[in-house]
Every structure is written in structure tokens, then in C-alpha cells.
Image (cartoon, rainbow, N blue to C red):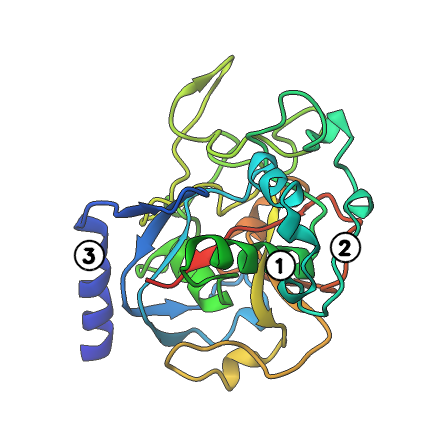
Amino acid sequence: MLRTGLILAAALTAFAAPIQTADDGYGELVFVPAGPFQMGDNLAEGDSRERPVHTVELDAFFIGKFEVTNAQWRRFRDDPGYDNPKLWPNGRPIPKDQIPYWTQANNHGGGTPGSDHYPVIGVNWDGATAYCNWLSAKTGKKYRLPTEAEWEKAARGADQRRYPWGNSIDHSYANFVGSQTFDTVREVGFYDGSRRGDLETHSNASPYGAFDMAGNVMEWCQDWYSRDYYSVSPTKNPKGPATGAYRVVRGGSFFVEAPDVRSAARSAAWPSLQAYRMLGFRVAREP
């Protein structure tokens, strides 16, 4: 009981605090304070890979307020540093013309007009990691992909809510299957609580001020994936298994049902996978 009380107290303190932000010139970040939260989901709608619910203690970190956009990726893509093998996990830069969807207007690819504020799609784990390494070199700060635990805390806070904004969902909150006639990405921050044409949106910001952590695109995390990792996960700053075949992706996408965009929902993808328009990412930064 004492442990639960401490976690709830930390949650209330976090939610009462004003949103803290930072910006190194490459996109706004929001601050997630150190402390415990309950990770996972024991509800019937959840999956066995989300169990058991367990307490995780995390150090403080920053996370992207939005998913990385086409405009942000283009800065990397057009920079001479893109071809630096030291930025890429396997030492082999991905040829720029191999990233799919870049020229597809129906998917708001970054090579088409009016696409700047849409999330970049079709970037694999290696590319997302290279982008973070490039940001680190540009800013002198430590950028990386969020761990799975960091991602979940940033999405739901410490009160075990199902979604970043609360416990219920409809299409005014997030971009999941059926939100549009043609299921594809929306602009980042679309669900900011304003009226968009004939759609009045609710804000889908998380307790710490991060948007679109439910739906839109699935987001790469740093961790290798293991279905049973929660049963052996360390309490302090877990970073996933030492090895694996797949990397964790979180957040669901525009092409899945509402239960799959819950903050606790887990999924995984082959890290070299590019040909997948539902995949994007957001960055994390150490304080």
C-alpha cells in the first residue's frame, strides 16, 4: 500500500507541475521527471506480453513533443553528415532513394508539396538511430531513441491511464483506423483541441505534453523486444534484453483498432524494415 501511495503521489505531483520544454534548434522536447510508474496492463483487453504490471523507476529525460517530421528528417537527409558511416549502427548509410513513400502524395511523403508537418514514414530502426546520432553531433547533447519504459511513462504518466489523455477514446482524440476515408498519417499535433474543418478535436497530449503518442505512426524504441521481458525486467531504468531479432515499436498507428493504440500496448518490428508506411519515430534526450 505504501508503494502504491508513493506512486500515486508522484503522479499527482507530475500532473500538477507545468509542462517543461527544451529546444536545441531541431524540434521541441518535453520533460519527463524522474520517479516511479506502473508499467504494463492487467486488463482483459490487454495481451499477455503486457503482463505483469510492475513498478519501474526512471531517471529524468526529455522526449520529442511530436513525432519526427518530414521537414526535420529532410535537414538530416540533405546534410553532408547523412553519409557519415559513424552515425549508422552498422556503418552503412541507407541510400536516400531507398526510403519508401518519400514521393507519395497520398501518404504525405516528404518529397511532396505541403508535407513538412507530417511525420516521416518508412524509416527503419537504423535510420532513426542515425538521426539521433546526427542530432547529438549537431547539438552536443545526448540524443537517442527512447527506451520502451521511457516511452510508456511519457505516454501515460503514473496513474495507469489507458490513453495519454484518459481512459476513453474516439476519433476526435487520435488517428486510428477509420479516422479518414484513406487511412494514412495526419499532421503532427493535429489533435490539439481545436476545430479542423468539420472535425472538432480533443487534445491528445500526454501528462507531460507529448502529442500523438496514440495512433498516427508506430514509433521505434531503443530496446530489443522480448514477449516475456516484463517477468525479468529490472526495476531501475530497464533497457530491454541484451539481444533479439526485433526492436520494440509503440503507440499503434492510423491502421489499427483502438485497443492497439493503448499506451501499454506492445509491438515489435524487424529493425531493417523500411517498406512500412505505419512506422515513424520520436527522439529522446538526456538532460
At x 74% / y 26%, what residue is drawn? 106
Amino acid type of the residue tagged 3 in the rendering: Leu
The answer to which of 164 and 68 lies nearer the viewer is 68
In the rendered view, would you say 187 is above or below 223?
above
Which residue is labeled 2 in the image?
A: 94
Label 1 close to label 3 by CB (< 8 Å): no
Tell me which numbered mark, 3 or 2, is placed earlier along the sequence.
3
> Neighbour class for label 1 at 10 Å: few (<14), some, many (≥20)?
many
Residue 94 location, x and y as percent? 76, 55
Q: Which residue is mark 1?
A: 130
Residue 12: numbered disc: 3
Among the 4 quarters of the image, the one containing residue 286: bottom left
Q: Residues within 10 Å of mark 3 (few under 14, many from 20)?
A: some
Residue 161 visible, this orientation: no
Q: Indicate the secondary structure of the residue bearing disc 3.
A: helix
Q: Nearer the viewer, residue 150 or 94?
A: 94
Residue type at mark 1: give it: Ala
Residue 265 position, x and y percent, is: 55, 59
Q: Quadrant of residue 270?
A: bottom right
Left or right of 262 in this view: 158:
left
Which quadrant would the N terminus be assigned to in this image?
A: bottom left
Q: How many marks?
A: 3
